[in-house]
Amino acid sequence: MAAAPKSMHRSSSRPQLDVSGAAIQGNLEERDPSILLPNQSDDISHLALDIGGSLIKLVYFSRHADHSNNDKRKKSLKERLGISNGNRRSYPILGGRLHFVKFETRKLNECLDFISSKQLHRGGIDLHTWHSPDDNAIIKATGGGAYKFADLFKERLGVSIDKEDEMDCLVAGANFLLKAIRHEAFTHMEGQKEFVQIDHNDLFPYLLVNIGSGVSMIKVDGDGSFQRVSGTNVGGGTYWGLGRLLTKCKSFDELLELSQRGDNRVIDMLVGDIYGGMDYSKIGLSASTIASSFGKTISENKEPSDYRPEDISLSLLRMISYNIGQISYLNALRYGIKRIFFGGFFIRGHAYTMDTISFAIHFWSKGQAQAMFLRHEGFLGALGAFMSYEKHGLDDLMAHHLVERFPMGAPYMGGMIHGPPLGDLNEKISWMEKFVRKGTEITAPVPMCPPGTTGVGGFERPSSKGDTLRSDASAAFNVGVLHLVPTLEVFPLLADPKTYEPNTINLSDHSELEYWFTVLSEHMSDIVDKAVASEGGTDDAKRRGDAFAHAFSAHLARLMEEPAAYGKFGLANLLELREECLREFQFMDAYKTIKQRENEASLAVLQDLLMELDSMSEEARLLSLIEGVLAANIFDWGSCACVDLYHKGTIIEIYRMSRKKMRRPWRVDGFDNFKERLLGSGDEKPKTHKRALLFVDNSGADIVLGMLPLARELLRRGTEVILVANSLPALNDVTAMEIPEIVAEAAKHCDILRKAAEAGGLLVDAMVNIQDGAVENYASAPLMVVENGCGSPCLDFRQVNSELAAVAKDADLVVLEGMGRALHTNFNARFKCDTLKLAMVKNQRLAEKLVQGNIFDCVCRFEPAV
Ligand SMILES: Nc1ncnc2c1ncn2[C@@H]1O[C@H](COP(=O)(O)OP(=O)(O)OP(=O)(O)O)[C@@H](O)[C@H]1O
Ligand SMILES: CC(C)(CO)[C@@H](O)C(=O)NCCC(=O)O
Ligand SMILES: [Mn+2]
């Protein structure tokens, strides 16, 4: 890597913010105070702009240093397993984040201040391709403002604007989003939002309708292949402009909010108004259909001020949305296109707007064409401009490289925080406290039940009741920060990656969401206690603990109110959100001490257990080992029932009790099949597995008394074993970093483990030998550790660490252990190799739903390779 720019702050995992001189701009009591960090700059940033007639959209990328290659153990593992970066391209981009921010074009100065305060225009100093020969910074920009304001940018920031064509950018942005973001597109009909799985092989042609100030309609036939087929000057600017004149509203959001309480019958002339209350059924028009938008105002002797602004706003919104829908339909018809994607900030995630457009498309096409919306609606152009930078490698990004995260500010209204979450802890906490104090936690849903009909062509009334209009002041109200992780890959052993869905529980079922809301809320104080204790229980830790509790509660409340607020959100995402939220408040490992204590207690009895196992016959031993894994899986700090148990006994006592209660058949009992696969039946000796991936769960008894003895058995049978564990802590789950120490301790009492660990380079002393290239000299099959790339109690096999993906290629046995990885997620997942799923169910509801059983039932599911 080339020399780092002066302003760069080296940081371990996340960009550190420079908060010196941080100030809240404007009045604290204002609805949207903005916090500016004048001296902050991200590690390295790259910026692209779309300067439109109404809004300026900014997409910027902050990169952070990659430390993953410095690890000695990892290097040796890579050598041992023959993993090189050879078959993968080396990425010119490193991991980083894409942030989305917008400003009003009339407040261009705020935007310039923002760019200069974050030093975004100085990004990419180390990549000369991003600079002109005279070393002037260049920013890619599109939209009319790229022309109009080029001189101003030069003057104020000293940067040259590299102009990119607006239509090129819109199309590039849309294609990128549809390709790279898994649940980017959705339909919105009668208040129901549904995410659409886009088939990349069947995407084109589509009609892209970008509703900005004006509207462009583009027929897209492929990457870079398109034609602007139409447009209309009646667009977002028209709604905002006319609305402003007619209602005296001060902001777009105010206007939109008004519409939610409007009744358009006062303004619009309905068919019934003309036909004396009757339908005109011969041509399919009901009495409630709007015959003429604003038509009713001609017949009355009223001034504009005699009409309620609410009603005016609603009529206007309907008129414009419907009109755009209709013209879009006509163009789709003209080119025989079935799919229409709508972008642009006029949509603003507003349910009523989307319903109206969808209705128009559906009505006129008689259900033949479909309107779809995009989560990053207004950022298409800016993203496209960003993509136009050469050699950043982003065009190769796939869905599995991107993880969207919702920082703590996401659920709150107002509070214009530009850019990444405040990295300085104190800033974050104060921000949190400020909102709690102001009581503006979550916007109350604005009921949206206009009395009576507002229909067009039988569209009786807006069905999007209870819709919430969220302040749009935060960077983007329903898009998170996109984390780019080039080292993530699809797990190659998935039988059918296309249809794979990790979550077994569907959170879009509201009762399910409610249930988890309650579980997580009840669990909150325990987690906060542990987190605070893990940081020494200081006042500072308590303050952070409070802030975490508020932030996570706010996320929960936000999701309860609008389940699709964060896109398609499964239980795995929800549990990960909690862990991420803890990390945001710098609780790096809330269960650290508990994990240590449990590891020690378990290691102390390991030797006895191994002796007992060694005295058994092969068959009895195998059963005992599986029983052991299931029994030890009882230790789960994520389960309320287990947390209760901990108050009643020591972990060894609980483990013994749990073992004693083991009764076969288990609720799901595939043990005999597994046994047959391993030991064979009769004289037939089955083929030994070459390599097993053991996805481990908890620390303590779970790993030490459950999974390690199982690993030892496989090793003894000549199978290579790779323990796969979390990259980051989640609850009391064991992490990949912690395992070598545990194994080293266990190896003191066991030759098999010691030899295997040495062969696998797990014992630090043994590292010297390995570097001599003496790998082949080990008699034992190796025991190794690989991280899974995630920091959640669940696992999404679409996005695993590339090292795991690499070692998986030669694996022929996968063992998934624990509720999070084997039940909440992946219970229904099928793999190309033999798979054993082992878990104790520690949740009554899940037991009933998934296995028609009860809490503390066990699952041992064996599925031969497909
Ligand atoms: N906070 C806001 N302020 C102003 N307009 C907003 C706001 N939020 C949404 N809008 C709507 O979004 C429209 C602008 O959308 P968008 O940013 O996609 O277009 P633009 O790029 O500014 O315009 P054009 O592409 O025609 O130059 C506005 O005309 C208005 O209808
Ligand atoms: C002029 C642009 C392309 C600027 O974004 C847009 O506002 C637009 O497409 N307006 C509609 C112009 C027309 O086709 O009637
Ligand atoms: Mn635009």
Image (cartoon, rainbow, N blue to C red):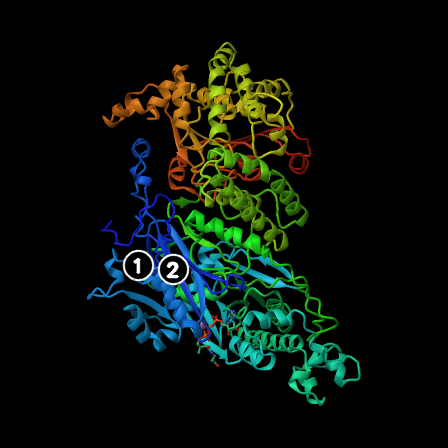
Please provide percent x and percent y for residue 860: 58, 28
Q: As displayed, is residue 381 above or below residue 831?
A: below
Q: Nearer the viewer, residue 6 or 705?
A: 6
Q: Answer above or below: position of 621 versus 260.
A: above
- Residue 583, horizontal then vertical, whole percent: 46, 43
Quadrant in the rendering for residue 723? top left
Residue contact at pointers 1 and 2, CB within 8 angstroms: yes
Q: Is residue 642 left or right of residue 425?
A: right
- Amino acid type, residue under disc 1 in the picture: Gly
Which residue is label 2 attached to? 60
- Disc 2 under 8 Å from ligand 1? The reply is no
Q: Which mark is residue 123?
A: 1
Residue found at the very far left of the displayed protein: 134
| Of callouts 1 and 2, the N-terminal one | 2
Element type at mark 2: strand
Tag 2: amino acid: Tyr
Q: Nearer the viewer, residue 841 or 560?
A: 560
When asked about the image quadrant of residue 688, the answer is: top left
Counting from the top left corner in percent of width and height, residue 477 is at: 52, 60
In the picture, measured across the screen, residue 509 lies left or right of residue 231, that is: right
Instruction: Work out which residue is located at the far top of the displayed protein and give it.
Output: 615
Callout 1 secondary element? loop
Residue 450 screen position, x and y as percent = 71, 70
Instruction: Choose between 168 and 338: the one closer to the eye.
Output: 168
Q: Residues within 10 Å of mark 1 (few under 14, many from 20)?
A: many
Q: Residue at x 41, y 64 (%)?
A: 58
Measured along the vertical axis of the image, is residue 518 above or below residue 275?
A: above
